[in-house]
Image (cartoon, grey):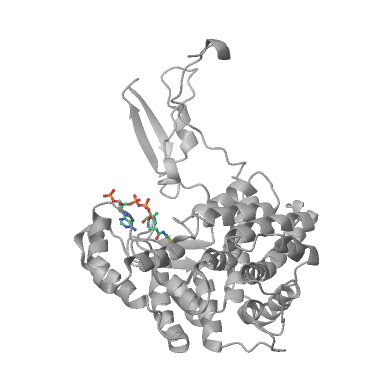
Amino acid sequence: MAETLTITDNRTGKQYEVPIHDGTIKATDLRQIKVTPDEFGMMTYDPAFMNTAACKSRITYIDGDKGVLLYRGYPIEQLAEQSDFLETAYLILFGELPSAKHYDEWKRNVMLHTMLHTNLSKLMEGFRHDAHPMGMFISTVGALSTFYPDAKDIFSAESRRLQTLRLIAKVPSIAAYCFRHSIGRPFNLPDNDLSYVGNFLNLLFRMTEPRFTVNPVLERALDVLFILHADHEQNCSTSTMRAIGSSHADPYSALAGAAAALYGPLHGGANEAVLRMLNEIGSKNNVPAFIKRVKAGEGRLMGFGHRVYKSYDPRAKIIKRMADLVFDVTGKNPLLDMALELERIALEDEYFVSRKLYPNVDFYSGLIYQAMGFPVDMFPVLFAIPRTAGWIAQWDEMLNDADQKIVRPRQIYIGSGPRDYVPKEKRR
Ligand SMILES: CC(C)(COP(=O)(O)OP(=O)(O)OC[C@H]1O[C@@H](n2cnc3c(N)ncnc32)[C@H](O)[C@@H]1OP(=O)(O)O)[C@@H](O)C(=O)NCCC(=O)NCCS
């Protein structure tokens, strides 16, 4: 028997049967609920989309209560242990793990596109010396649309494939140029014989040596961090990617918008906020007083809490293990002891326990990035590189979904009723 939800409208006494599919009712099925025929019909009010599914997706599954994260069905723990970022990106984008042959082709094709057009680097040279790298990143990704006008052909699978290669290949180059610009050093050229992440480290850190030597521990650590950040279903930036893409804008413009959403401190800026918070706290002794202030509502414990995870973020567990390996190479980040103490106290404290506030992915990632030599301003940029894979996969899925239309939420108007215009001289 088909599942339905029976709704009784006590304004009219009428009953409605609304079909249930996948544990969900269609919001538009509520429109038939009216008191008078000329009414618009019943809507749902859901600011911040707390309980609204905006799409059907096959990409990423999260069970926030159990702390489960799957990309295309594969557990994040197994991918972090056994895969690399380029393979995971392929999985997210195309739905399956590549065969050895397809992996080699994919890697070769991505690495062919790592170079940036000279005019793009000239454009980047125009930023002020102290420009925030994320601001530079957003603008430069947006500018890519002017270099590749063929990207407007969004309904050509071939064009989408080419823009995907370009984006996956060029975001590390753009990110590295942002970094080099802010420290006043010349841009490096890609070394395509290195791995995806090895080349990124070369673009960032090579000085005068003819060939950059990649530290394998740092290379692997960054690769794992990239795997962990590659997708996270319908978060703020991904919803932005889908929303902009729904107007049929080209993928570079849509991705610049998604990156802008990622910039905010409640999303991709959170690990930067964690480090600022740790610096403000100053020492382990000040941790209890800081927790007290948070509990009194005077600020948040950054890197704690998540809209979806109501248990330990599975990515945070992997990152915490990674941190030890990185600190063996770089030396311990002096802020680590404070972070561990904050976590220890918070996990025992009724305020955090009752609200199911646990460390999220950003709590430890900033400490690793800082130990690797990245300034805090680069953190959201480092997030945007792997998330590019997720953004493109979600954009592509949206374009191929017959249920999707241009995004256009409704509102409940609570402003003034109709009134006559008053000339300036007659206004009070
Ligand atoms: C991620 C975040 C935005 C999710 O927010 P949300 O799902 O909208 O949760 P809410 O803001 O409704 O918070 C629920 C309760 O927990 C409290 N809370 C949530 N996160 C908190 C934090 N980091 N520190 C202290 N209290 C927190 C809220 O004050 C609220 O308490 P109340 O019910 O007494 O008012 C939020 O937890 C946060 O701001 N965390 C810090 C920023 C961060 O680390 N972001 C990265 C996410 S990957």
Image quarter for ligand 1: bottom left
Please identify the quarter of the rendering in which residue 164 is found: bottom right
> 80 or 182, which lies in front?
182
Tell me, yes or no, if residue 348 can be seen here: yes
- Residue at 37% across, 64% down: 277
Please identify the quarter of the rendering in which residue 322 is found: bottom left
- Residue at 57% across, 68% down: 386
- Residue at 51% across, 77% down: 224
Please identify the quarter of the rendering in which residue 188 is found: bottom right
Q: Is residue 105 left or right of residue 17?
A: right
In the image, residue 392 lies at what x, y percent? 63, 60
Tell me, yes or no, if residue 400 can be seen here: no
- Position of 226 relative to 270 (above/below): below
In the image, residue 330 lies at what x, y percent? 47, 85
Q: Is residue 55 left or right of residue 212?
A: left
- Position of 337 relative to 175 (above/below): below
Locate the N terminus by quadrant.
top left
